[in-house]
Amino acid sequence: MNSSHSKKPKAAMGGRMAGMMAGDKAKDFKGTFRRFMKYMGHYRISVVIVMIFAVLSTIFMIVGPKILGNATTLLAEGIMGSFTGSDQGIDFAGIAGILLWLLGIYIVSSLFSLLQGLIMTNVSMKLTYRLRRDISVKLNKLPLKYYDRTTNGEILSRITNDIDTLSQTLNQSITQIITSVTQLIGILIMMISISWQMTLIAIAILPVSLIFVLAIVKRSQKQFTAQQKYLGNVNGHVEEMYGGHQVMKAFNGEEESVEKFREYNDKLYESAWKSQFLSGVMMPVMVFVTNLGYVAVCIVGAIFAGNGTITIGDIQAFIQYVRQFTQPITQVANITNILQQTAAAAERVFEFLGEEEEIPESEYPITVNNTDEPDTELNVHIGGSVQFAHIRFGYNKDKIVINDFSADIKQGSKIAIVGPTGAGKTTIVKLLMRFYDVNEGAVLIDGYDIKDFRRRDLRSLFGMVLQDTWLYSDTIRENIRYGSFDATDEQVYAAAKAAQVDHFVHTLPDGYDMVINEESNNISQGQKQLITIARAILADPKILILDEATSSVDTRTEILIQKAMDNLMKGRTSFVIAHRLSTIQNADTILVLNEGNVVEQGSHEELMAKGGFYERLYNSQFETA
């Protein structure tokens, strides 16, 4: 059948989008932070409030030394008056008033600081939640080819380590930047108001500090990027080795695994050591440069106080400002290092969010009509016939797996797909369920191109039992109910009996309420397979896919399952993939695949009579070495 025979709805014929526009990948740190700030747009009001409160808190803190200097001046004048014999003593009432005023200012400053901290924590938690939610949604939109080339540990590293880095930066560094800049400007103004000459001396240390900061940041930037990369490699390797530790031990792979871990860990250690060392060097260098400026200010201040240019209180305030003046510079320098690490983490997160997604749904998708309403162009009942129309497919475009495969499957037929390993049997199933899209040709159900269905509706037509079982940590009852979430307990029990699950469940502790652990190793492989078969029975699908469904059970159980499957497959289109050819002799049609092509097709008797590839494949299972 040619794909041009598809009964596409008129509306669905036009205007399917070619592909989902992937987000721009971060190419540099500036671009990454621009996107990050754009991401914070939902919280702009809260961020503005945080900025205002941070500025107010800093301003109140800045005026403190100046006010304290007035108290020092009053105390000095009182002491000098006592020495000179004047009637004016120390004005304790005036000093007390100044100190109370200073206490009030510091309390107000602390309140503003507390409020901005609470608001910023709320913003960072919401943004972290949103990022993780978007990543979770993205995971379900990515094509399977992404998971084929990316380790689970690498993905987990982006969800956990990188997101946590962004959260910490938001919660601490953003407000610190605001307060540092405000503090730098405010202190500079206060210093100029006291003495512009001493201010010039204090400012003279800035170029020297800047030279050191830029030199260190330039070298640390690459190391922070490498650190995040190798951290993902270490996590990926550990996750893989933990998940497959039984296989690793069975094949004596411990030494190789440890050696590979050591290689990744050495690279992580090297990059982390260099980045942390360069980050740690920043503070001692800044302290040294700061002390040089501090000594110069003390000398000049003493000269000015001696000739009466400024008061003792102003000198005391200015010295405090000089010490505070270098703090925001040091903080900005430290934050710069943190921002480099954050940029590397943000870049990896946005790269993930910018990955190419599955081809989007049709602009006018067909939906499956499960009601008694009449069919329309976009809402149809499905019987279960399947057509492969000259499909061509390769996981990589330069390496084709399926070459010009065509087949017309009648509704209710039992189709067996056989062939040697690597012939493309499982690939046919993946294309049928649209886990991958064909390069050429079309796959059709009841004459409708599967690309015109919503994926949700398309996959609801299928029930799958695969060679690799998948169960999640919950009760046996809920694992079966995964096939139909609204099924009653009676329907679950009926499906369990049909799949030969019921007879062994009663031998387990807690029966159907027994919780399968995270590794699913508290039940046998055969029992796991039976539960997945019960799940497929409960789903009551139009089309069944059985990929080596009985490969993990004993011969006696296989016979029982086969009877249940025969009842289940009545009236349903069924695709059975099997290596044991004795299990598919009663198939209506057997498709024989070899190197991506259908080399033969027909019933078991017809293919055996031909004496071709199938006959040799069938007899090979009875040959002895």
Image: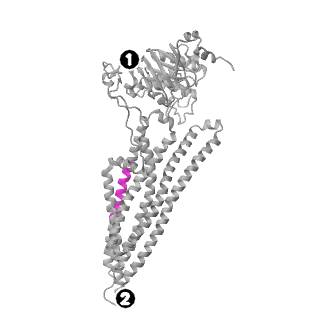
Query: x%, y% of residue 337?
Result: 45, 57
Q: Mark 1: which amino acid?
A: His
Q: Secondary structure at mark 2?
A: helix
Q: Is residue 290 visible?
A: yes
Q: Which residues are magenta?
A: 108-125
> Badge 1 is on which residue?
5
Q: Residue 118 lies in magenta, yes or no?
A: yes
Left-right relation of 533 to 460:
right
Q: Mark 2: which amino acid?
A: Phe
- Residue name at image x 46 percent, y 71 percent: 291
**For this rendering, which residue is in front, 198 or 27?**
27
Query: x%, y% of residue 425?
Result: 52, 23
Query: x%, y% of residue 538?
Result: 45, 23
Q: Is residue 211 above or below residue 255?
A: below
Q: Is residue 465 visible?
A: no
Query: x%, y% of residue 498?
Result: 50, 20
| Residue 421 lies in quadrant | top right
Q: Quadrant of the N terminus?
A: top left
**For this rendering, which residue is in front, 551 or 149?**
149
Q: Secondary structure at mark 1?
A: helix
Left-right relation of 529 to 623:
left
Q: Give the CA distance from mark 2 to mark 1.
A: 112 Å
Query: Is the image coloured rainbow, by chain, by secondary structure, or in one colour?
Result: one colour
Q: Residue furthest right?
A: 625
| Crowd class of label 2 (few under 14; some 14 to 19; many from 20; radius 10 Å) | few
Left-right relation of 540 to 70:
right
- Residue name at image x 43 percent, y 39 percent: 355
> Badge 2 is on which residue?
83
